Image (cartoon, grey):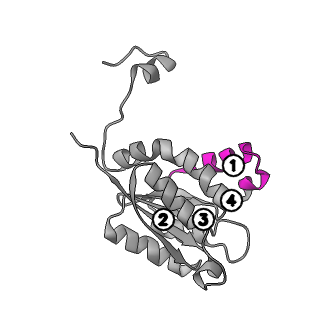
Amino acid sequence: MAETVIRALAVTVSNRAAAGVYEDRSGPVLVELLRSAGCAVDGPLVIPDGDPVEAALHDALAAGYDVVVTTGGTGLTPGDLTPEMTRRVIEREIPGIAEELRSAGAAAGVPSAILSRGVAGVAGRTLIVNLPGSTGGVRDGMAVLAPVLGHAVSQINGGDHTRTETDSSAKGLPGIA
């Protein structure tokens, strides 16, 4: 049975990049890393923060993407509204992803990673994850996200929890055949 390809959209949230003040640097890195994770990727779509984020997420849901990953808009400035716009769209948060993204960034030697307010969650059958706007934040974030992406998409689409002998024995449970 052929493995289903994950359809992903990369979205760069940056008022200045959207206005042409400077070139988007994190979006192309995100596209490359999503492709490396086995996704068929569209984007990067470069948009300003605020209401355009909510609109882009709704458009992505209507287009049937499995995954939407944003980069940018997760900081503390008054204009960083990506988490708020994402929360308007998602139906269920996945706090473990957001927590691990911050933790991994801090562990990689970036103390300010704990200031990222990015969220992750499910809307319909789409996984939405906010990453920081730096190329390093995208790399660190995708190192966390890539290994669980296929499993998350499978679960969102009703896939069964798969367990290996290693998973079971680590919990002191008998192996599952």
Q: Nearer the viewer, mark 4 or mark 1?
A: 1
Q: Over which residues does the magenta segment extend?
A: 94-114
Q: Nearer the viewer, residue 72 or 163?
A: 72
| Label 4 SS | loop
Marks 2 and 4 sit apart, C-alpha to C-alpha, by 18 Å
| Type of amino acid at the residue the image marks with label 2 | Ala
Q: Secondary structure at mark 2?
A: strand
Q: Nearer the viewer, mark 3 or mark 1?
A: 3
Q: Which residue is mark 2?
A: 10
Label whose residue precedes the other's in the sequence (4 or 1) = 1
Numbered disc in front, either 2 or 4: 2
The residue identified by callout 3 is 26
Q: Which residue is mark 1?
A: 105
Q: Amino acid at mark 3?
A: Ser
Residue 86 image position (x, y, % from top left): 52, 67
Label pair 4/1, CB-CB below 8 angstroms: yes
Residue lying at 30% horizontally and 46% vertically, measured from the top left: 158
Q: On the image, numbered disc 4 is attached to which residue? A: 116
